[in-house]
Image (cartoon, rainbow, N blue to C red):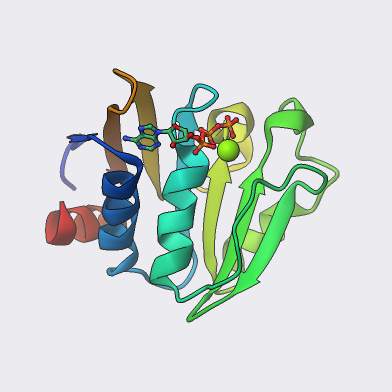
Amino acid sequence: MRGDVEYKITTNSEQETIELAQNIESEKFSNMIICLEGDLGSGKTVFTKGIANGLGIDENLTSPTFSIIKEYHGEYPLYHMDVYRLKGDLSELGIQEYFYKGGIVVIEWADMVEKYLPKERLNIKIKITGENTRLFIITPVGKKYEDLCEAVL
Ligand SMILES: Nc1ncnc2c1ncn2[C@@H]1O[C@H](COP(=O)(O)OP(=O)(O)OP(=O)(O)O)[C@@H](O)[C@H]1O
Ligand SMILES: [Mg+2]
């Protein structure tokens, strides 16, 4: 196994973040899990929109404010979760079943529910570095995610 690889990518606009997400989406596989962490307004939802676009989802993607999870139907199903309001407690929600439903899972504030996540996943930390700039620190865990990163990053 390779060691902990880390990719650092800066985007200079919302559009560049969407393109980064689309690149990652282009190497998708069933049950792919993308974990996003980063402050309010860092671009987690914008990134998720890029994944949705890549999957051919036309519906406007918004944060799942009243639900914890929203489901979209594209080339693969997209399960978009925002666990901010859960305050770390996933135990009663049955959210784990979504990790094995054959879709793509994107989780905002994944760091809050870390103990419930599968070990193999794509971890993405987003840092606000300026008004329109964001630093993406991408860490693949597991061979499929390492191969994905090697292919597109
Ligand atoms: N390089 C960039 N990439 C992504 N978004 C950017 C960038 N530069 C500026 N922005 C702006 O930052 C904001 C990101 O908002 P977004 O809703 O995606 O954040 P979020 O991380 O999902 O926040 P929350 O924690 O509230 O869910 C948008 O208003 C977007 O236009
Ligand atoms: Mg959001």
Query: Vertically, is 26 above or below 89?
Result: below
Instruction: Farthest residue to the top: give it.
Output: 129
Q: Quadrant of residue 109?
A: top right
Front one among 122 and 78: 78
Residue 55 appears left or right of 128: right
Q: What residue is rendered at 64% in x and 51% in y?
A: 62
Task: Using the image as rendered, state which of residue 96 and residue 129 is in the foreground.
Answer: 129
Farthest-out residue, right: 92
Give the quarter of the image for residue 133: top left
In this picture, is 138 found above or below 26?
above
Q: Residue at x 48, y 31 (%)?
A: 37
Q: Position of residue 130 (x, y in %)?
A: 30, 18
Relative side of 123 to 66, left or right:
left
- Residue 98: x and y in percent read 65, 62
Question: Residue at (56%, 45%) from the top-left corner?
Answer: 107
Q: Residue at x 25, y 60 (%)?
A: 23
Whether residue 119 is visible, yes or no, is: no
Pinpoint residue 89: horizontal percent, then vertical percent: 77, 32
* In this view, 35 is above or below 50: above
The one nearer the camera, 127 or 6, is: 127
Residue 126 on image: x %, y %: 37, 29
Is residue 81 in sight in this rendering?
Answer: yes
In depth, the one of 99 and 25 nearer the eye is: 25
Query: In which quarter of the view is residue 5 placed?
Result: top left
Disc tally is 0
